[in-house]
Image: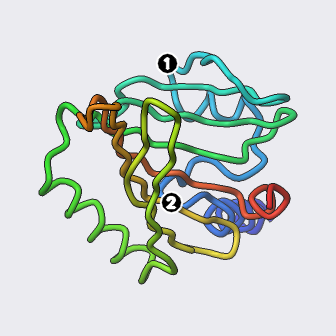
Amino acid sequence: MKKLLFLFLSMYTFIFAITDFPSINWKDKEFDILMSFPGIEEDLSYLQDTKILSQENPKDKISSYKFYLKNGSLYKVEVVFDSSRVEKNDIKNIYETLEKNMGTPVSKDPININLGDMNLRGNSITFFPDSETTVFFKGMDTIDKDNNMINSQLSLEYWDNRMLNMAQ
């Protein structure tokens, strides 16, 4: 009986775990995330009913992991890369790893947002690694009014498809 229960729990975790984050699942609570990622702190949130938990410098060339909880349930994980340490070859390797693990991207979309004196420019590449998750690989530069790049950000966003579909 114990073996059967262990098998069920193992299968549940394996089947429903978030791609690249096998220790957590969509709709997990804050406690579950804190148990899986020590050193997490609450981050400022500009989103209503959303709490953001952040782990700084979790791995080489990664600035932070951000966990988004709406009404106490996990719906988004963001990996923010350290722009001062990630090089062009790293970006290529990240993309190739995503393609190998998640399959061919379903879309490649330009980002061009005018914010008055600044523009955000870049690309977003979308993957569907499983039926529960959408992954966006984003590279975005902030350009000032004199056409100088003042910031650059590379990130991976993992979304619970149920929450993503409600947002549309």
Instruction: Residue at 44%, 29% (x, y): give it.
Output: 117
Displayed quadrant of residue 145: top left
Displayed quadrant of residue 73: top right
User: Label 1's element?
Assistant: loop
Q: What residue type is labelled 1?
A: Gly
Measure the alpha-carbon separation of dots 2 and 1.
25 Å
User: Label 2's element?
Assistant: strand
**Position in image of residue 84 (x %, y %):** 19, 31
**Position in image of residue 164 (x %, y %):** 74, 59
Residue 132 placement, left or right of 100: right
What residue is pinned by disc 2? 136
What residue is pinned by disc 1? 39
Q: Observer-nearest residue: 147 or 30?
A: 147
Residue 101 placement, left or right of 75: left
Label drawn at residue 9: none
Q: Observer-nearest residue: 151 or 100?
A: 151
Instruction: Residue at 20%, 63% (x, y): give it.
Output: 92
Vertical comparison of 83 with 40: above or below = below
In the picture, the quarter occupied by the N terminus is bottom right
Which is more foreground, mark 2 or mark 1? 2
Displayed quadrant of residue 123: bottom left
The reply to whether the C-beta atoms of the residues labelled 2 and 1 are less than 8 Å apart is: no
Residue 58 placement, left or right of 46: left
Label 1 crowding class (10 Å Cα cut-off): few <14, some 14-19, many 20+?
few
**Position in image of residue 13 (x %, y %):** 66, 59
First in sequence: mark 2 vs mark 1: 1
Q: Observer-nearest residue: 118 or 63?
A: 118
Vertical comparison of 72 with 24: above or below = above
